[in-house]
Image (cartoon, rainbow, N blue to C red):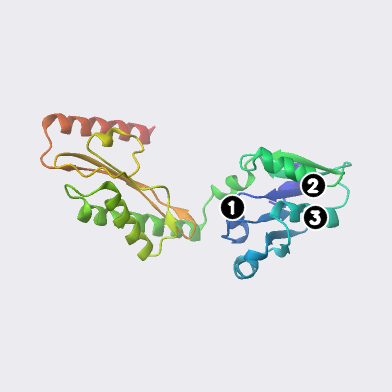
Amino acid sequence: MQQSLSALRLDALLITHPPNIRYLCGFTGSSGALLLTEKKTVFITDGRYTEQARFEVRTAKIVIGRQGALAATAAWLSGHQKKGRRGAAKVGIEGEHMTVAARSRLAAILPPGFRLRETPNLVERARMVKDEDEIGCIRSAVILGASLFDRALETIRPGVPETGVAAAMEFAARKSGAEAMSFETIIASGERSALPHGRASQAVIPALGFVVCDFGVILSGYCSDMTRTVYMGRPSAEARGFYDAVSRRSRLHWTR
């Protein structure tokens, strides 16, 4: 990231998207900012995360501000970043992630002589290339996520609420070390199985019909995702036709 600053004509790069912060320096909290210049790397957060930052953050100086992360970032820039190569100091921001309101606040509190510029998805591009350790993390997340289908099969019974199935799966995930679910667990049964993203509801599992299960876990910051469809009772020829049509369509989608 530091090596890219010169090519982008930036004097600093501000990272505010939590997954990108975690990727670059290891911090897993919900409030912080990572500021990069060609020679310095500074992680900025508030007093709530003092101990967590000291434990997690790697390869960056830690600054604990009395204000919010953006205000503390502006204060650090004011005191450390001199005039840019071409007049005003240009600070890159993550345009895909920083809200309009946050950008406006940051621009308002920065002193004269600073300009904010949206940057392409620099960190996301780096994250696309996985090293051996990352592949291992992904594999572990997939294995843990896939194991939850066994818990689903144990729980899916006529009369059981969809939320009950989801709760059993999520409890098993937590017991096995998952940080969280990749997304809100989908258990959609009966007529609700036609919904593309039918999040678990209080509807009960019918004695006859499809049950779509879509689930995944976050482990060491990496996500898994698995979809399986089961049928309660003996499927009719029409139901088998529906299943086969969706299966063929899915295979066509993934092979394109």
Q: Position of residue 117 (x, y in %)?
A: 74, 39
Where is mark 2, residue-wise? 109
Q: Is residue 198 visible?
A: yes
Q: Residues within 10 Å of mark 3 (few under 14, many from 20)?
A: some
Q: Quadrant of residue 245?
A: top left
* Picture quadrant where residue 252 is located: top left
Examine the rendered structure and indicate whether residue 244 appears above or below residue 226.
Answer: above
Which of disc 2 and disc 3 is earlier in sequence? 3
Q: Nearer the viewer, mark 1 or mark 2?
A: 2
Mark drawn on residue 18: 1
Task: Describe residue 214's horizontal placement relative to residue 55 as left or right.
Answer: left
**Front residue of 100 and 90:** 100
> In screen coordinates, is 50 left or right of 80?
left
Tag in front: 3 or 1:
3
Q: Which residue is mark 3?
A: 75
Do the residues bearing badges 3 and 2 touch, measured as CB atoms within 8 Å?
no
Above/below status of 18 relative to 86: below
Q: How far is the residue under mark 1 from the one under mark 2?
A: 22 Å
Label 3–label 1 contact, CB within 8 A: no
